[in-house]
Each structure stands twice: as structure tokens, then as C-alpha cells.
Amino acid sequence: MGFFAERKKTKEQKRALEQAQIENQIAKTKANTIILNARISAAEKFTNTGYSHGGASRSESWAKGYDDESLSPSSDIEMNRKELRQRTRDLYMNAPIGTAAIKATRTSCVGIGLKPKPKIDYEFLGISKEEAADIQRLIKKEFAIWAESTLCDICDLNNFYELQQIVFNDWLMNGEEFVLMAYGEKTSYMPYRLRLKLVTADRISTPGSLDGTYDGYDQTTKLGNRIMNGVEIDKDGKVVAYHISSNFPGENGTTQTTWKRVVKRGKNTGNPNILHVFNAERAEQYRGVPFLAPVITSIKQLTRYTEAEIMAAVINSIFALFVSTEDGEEVEGFSGVDSEDDDWDDDTYPDTSRQDNEYRLGNGIINFLKEGEKVEAVESKHPSGNYDGFVTAFTTMIGAALEISPEVLMKKFTNNFSASKGALNETWRHFSTRRKWFIDDFCKPVYELWLAEAVGSGRINIPGFFTDPLIKQAYASATWTGPAQGCLNPVQEVNAAVTRMEHGLSTHEDECAAINGSDYDDNVRTLMNENKSLAEANRQEE
């Protein structure tokens, strides 16, 4: 018995020890939890600084329902670009403000076309100013042969300046435009082979995507490149090719949809085979965003509000009476005028005759109510007296987002000269920037390709053009002139231009381009001829 008693005692001690260890562990865990919670609380208080008190706050009531997730350009832009593109085109076709924003930008940036003025760097080339002037005049004449003919268009529909308007318009609506460099046959009336083919942004898509929708997954080619929404990119992120669908996505054609791979640049020359006209907003962005994308909601809501006000005004303009009689029968002697009476003629159009439960609203319409029926007039408050102020405030907000002043957007200059001029100047900075982007992405590459063909075919003799990039750049240098800003007060603005030139703050060339978009050299040459003719006429009269 002594042995078993001792053994039992040992077991009880062991159990007690284990229980003490468990309780000790529980106590430690609780203590650690308290410490951890204290540390978390302290950390939250410590990190709750700077922007976390405002725009980055997660505790304020307004921030709790704020869905602010933003990921890569691929997720933020490519996954939504199709919808943005379609809605922007809809607003351009059906919303006055959307149409005005795009057309105002296109007209001011491109207008009837941006024309090149060769500016050969004769000092670097070591030729005389006179030699450079002769070459420049020849380049202008040769370029006019190609640019002013519709044969520069592979479809033979538009000349180069009309193509500019289409490309620019598509750039704004779709966020981008693609231009294929093609080559046709020389003819007796067109010595140049260069042809341009416009490709709408919808057709640039990943092979197999019949509706043009980007699902977020990129294809991998045999070369190890990835195709992201029709753009083929190598491992370094460089664009190497574009994939063009034979049919417009989502449309059922008579032919099977196939994709053509177009390498971005020629391997030997480095010349572009396809141009991508767009402006990136973020790093690692490979496709463009429509011009109206930030204001789609605002323009759509403003359009709905305007349509509601118009409908309310139409209804409010209608004068109709409801006559309640004891038996619900018409009273002799009453009549009304309805411009659509023929549609309600029971004999002519029995299917459209008024049913027992139908009533009409119209100009001078009389409706007879059945016994027991009554109609109370509702006083209309439309059109709203605040409509003009609301629209003005909204267009100001939309214009600010698009960098277009409300005066330019609405073509309404009602403020004083200084305010209107300031609004025009601010908007013109945006137009000038966008024009520069367009020149760099479209006009300049096309001009350089044409000049290379002109030199290669021997129509323009430029030694060393193909041997040294510096020589090529010196000959290909050009300025592009287009629509001028215009004058609100011609006398004041011309006097200011004269003052700037007198003090060396500007040149005759710059002022001619700014005031009316003309070419200074052409003006001088024309004035010389006019003055000569005028002098001869005066001598004959004497």
C-alpha cells in the first residue's frame, strides 16, 4: 500500500504542476494580448499624422464608404477603356457640351490643317542662307504635290490636311488613333508612293478577342513578348508591334475575323510602320484615354437636366381644359385646336381613336370627363429660373477639367476685354500643348517619311541625308503653323505686337502666326509684288 500511495501522490503532483503551467501560459497570453493591443493603439496614434487626418483618413464618416481603390494603368484604364470610348462617342454625337468641347479643341488646334514651314539649319550644314532658302522653297512645293492630293490617303478620299482633322477628332473621342504607313504605285500625276491608312482604336485588340474587350489577361508570344490589349510588349516594356483586327469588334461581318501583326519600326531603317497618336498620363500606360473621360458623368447629367427642362417647358406651353359634366357627355359649342387632330380621327384612324380611359394634352385641347371625375391643375415651375446659373456653373466646372474656359466652350464672350482675353489666353495654353503633341506624334513623322522618299527618289537633292542623323535632322527641321488665337480687340493687340517686336521680345514670324496664322516670308513676298504693281499703276496714271 505504501508503494501505491506514493505513486498516486506523484501523479497528483504532476497534474498540479501541469495545471500550473497551463494557467501560467494563459496568463502570459493575456498579458501579451494586452501589450499587443496597446502597441497597436500606440501605432495607430503614431501613424495618424499628415494626410491621415484628411484625404487618407479611414476613420472619418465620409471616408468609410469611400471606394478609392486604384491599381495599375492596366487595371484602371484598359479594363474600362472600351466603355469610356463608347460613352465619349455618344456624348460627342448627342450631348451639346460634349460636341462643343471636342470641336472647339479640334478647330483651334488643327483647323483647316497644320502646314510645315521648312527651317533648314544652314549654319550647321555649312551652306549659305540663300542656298537654304532655295531648298526650303523646293521642299514646300514638292510637299504640296503630295499633301494637297487625296492620293496621300490610301482610300483616295482626303488630303493630308483633311486627314489631320480626322486623326485629331478620333484622338479626342477614342483617346488615340493609329496610322499605317503604306506604299502605293507611282503615277504620272503622283510621283510619291507614301500612303496613309487610318485605323480606328477599336480594331487594335488581342487576337481572339472578338468583341474587343480586355479581360485583364495578356497573351504570351513564342518570342516571350506579351500582348496587352493589342499592343505587343517585350520583356523590357518596349512596344514592338501592334495587332489589328480585320473586322470592327462586335460587328458580324461576312468574313472571318483575323489579326495582322504590324511591327512598329523597320528593322533596317528604324522608320515607323505604324503611328500611335496618344498622350500618356501615367508611367507604363500603353493605350490612350478619351478626352471627355473625366467629365462623362457631369456632361451626361447636365444633358439629362437640360432635356428635362425642355420637356417641362413644352408641357407648360400646352393649354388644355378639362370639363366635368353630370353625365360625362360632351357639351356642344366647345372645340379645340390640336396639331395632331388627324391622328385622333376615329373614322380615318380607328386604331388610334381615344379610348374611354385616354385623355389628350395639346394646344387648345378640350377633354370631357366622365361623371365623378375631376382634374386639378398643377402649377408648373418650369423652366426653372435657376437653369441658366446652374448650366453656367456646370460648364465652368467641366471646362476647368478640360482646360477650356467657359467663354470658349460656350462661344460666349460677355465679360470685359481683360477677363475675356485672360480666359482665351489660358485656354490657348492648352490648345498649344495639345497641338505640339499632335505634331510630334503625327505630322512630324509623316513629314520626315515623305522627305526621305523625296530625297531617295532624287526629286530633292540633299547630300548626306541618309548617312548622318544630324544632317537628316538639320534638313528635316520645320515649324508647323495652324489656326491663330485671334484678336478680341485688334487695335490693342496689334499695337502690343508691334511693341514686342520693337523691343526684341518677339519676331515678325511669331507675330504673324499668332495674330492670323500667316507666314511672314509669304507676306513679304506678296507685299513686294503688290507694292511693285501699285508703283507701276501710279506711274501709268501720271
Image (spheres, helix red, strand yellow):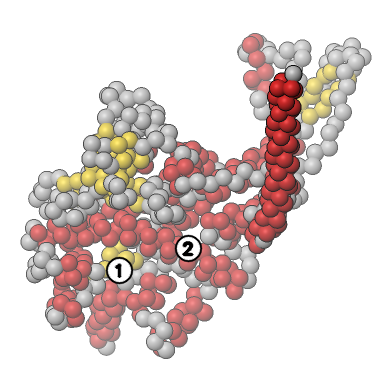
> Label 2 belongs to which residue?
430
Q: Nearer the viewer, residue 315 or 264?
A: 264
Q: Amino acid at mark 2?
A: His
Disc assigned to residue 479: 1
Q: Residue at x 42, y 89 (%)?
A: 503
| Residue 97: % across, % down | 56, 49
Q: Residue at x 61, y 70 (%)?
A: 419
Q: Is residue 354 left or right of residue 202?
A: right
Q: Nearer the viewer, residue 165 or 83?
A: 83
Name the quarter where the C terminus is drawn. Answer: bottom left
Q: Residue at x 87, y 18 (%)?
A: 373
| Residue 433: % across, % down | 43, 63
User: To which quarter of the image does residue 408 belong?
Assistant: bottom right
Q: Residues within 10 Å of mark 1 (few under 14, many from 20)?
A: few
Name the quarter where the N terminus is drawn. Answer: top right
509 in relation to 240, above or below = below
Q: Residue furthest right?
A: 326
Disc assigned to residue 270: none
Q: Is residue 52 left or right of residue 377?
A: left
Q: Residue at x 73, y 46 (%)?
A: 31
Q: Nearer the viewer, residue 494 or 43?
A: 43
Q: Residues within 10 Å of mark 2 (few under 14, many from 20)?
A: some
Q: Amino acid at mark 1?
A: Thr
| Residue 417: % across, % down | 59, 72
| Residue 20: % across, % down | 73, 36
The secondary element bearing badge 2 is classed as: helix
The secondary element bearing badge 1 is classed as: strand
Q: Residue furthest front?
A: 2
Q: CA distance from mark 2 to mark 1?
A: 19 Å
Q: Is residue 505 left or right of residue 375?
A: left
